[in-house]
Image (spheres, grey):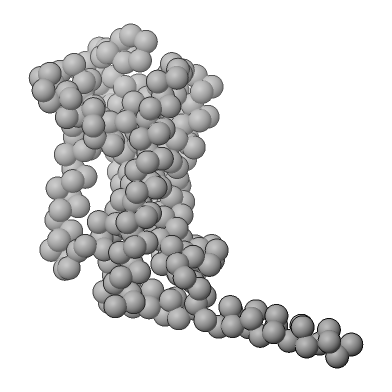
Amino acid sequence: MTGLLDRAAPRSRAGLLFRIVPPGLYAGRSHVLVQRAFLVNRRAWLSVVSGFFEPVLFLLSLGFGFGRLVTTVAGPGGPIPYAEFVAPALLAASAMNGAVFDATYNLFFKIKYARVYEAMLATPMGPVDIALGEATWALLRGGLYSAGFLVVMLGFGLVSSAWALLALPACLLVAVAFAAVGMAATTFMRSWQDFDLVQLFVLPLFLFSTTFFPLTVYPPALQVVVQFTPLYHAVELIRALTKGFVGWSLLVHVGYFVVMATIGVMVAARRLGRLLTS
């Protein structure tokens, strides 16, 4: 009996040490940060859901307003009504906007002013937990915008295929990729003025990534540039799903965002570790 107690004592001390001393980079506790974000934002739900209305207003003004002046445009499988061309692009843009702005402005405030993450690193959480937790919360917020807008598309009859059910998971993938890159970029920012660069990045993507015009209207050299942008891949992926033109080529778009999310999380975790432990 004494021998068993002697062997159990080191194990219990090791378990206590693991709970007290923060492990390396990852402790499997990213869900705790998501719970915290939910508790903080439950009383500010209006600011969370307000981002849903922007793409709806764009759809009403351009998709149906300007769309009366445009009969059809080139889409997946042939000419389609302009509203059906714009709506999937706005769905992709809503996922991007919801993820980027939550993963940049909020993250910067928590790092520079609230010092939230310094307190978290005094617990068993590590930088990778923080990066994954923030990316998950941004994913949920972007997914909320996307789900609401997809319901609006269904209400207006802008979805013509059952493949559109996969549009929501696609939007979640887009959201987590943009959130990861947004977090990584935020770790390099020094002041609020640097956030002008976020607008400088997001606004051209929104305007030129075949959101409102088909790729063929651009000069050949500019077409190549557009095809490398992330929102272009998001728009093409979701537009194909909502129209039911599904093929192996869509895996290229999926792979693009998997790589984008992986690199973003890795860079964000490494940078957070340096910023918060130096």
Image-based side of 245 in relation to 16, left or right: left
The image quarter in which residue 61 lies:
top left
192 lies above or below 260: below
Q: Is residue 173 left or right of residue 229?
A: right
Q: Residue at x 38, y 74 (%)?
A: 117
The image shows residue 198 at horizontal and vertical percentages of: 19, 52
- In the depicted view, which residue is nearer to us: 17 or 1? 1
Tell me where residue 97 appears, x and y as whole percent: 31, 47
**Is 114 situated above or below 57?**
below
| The furthest residue to the front | 3
Q: Nearer the viewer, residue 88 or 113?
A: 113
For the point 18% across and 46% down, the residue is: 201
Quarter of the picture holding the N terminus: bottom right
Nearest the eye: 15 or 216:
15
Q: Is the residue 140 above or below the residue 130 in the image?
A: above
The quadrant of the picture occupied by the C terminus is bottom left
Q: Quadrant of residue 135?
A: bottom left
Outermost bottom residue: 2
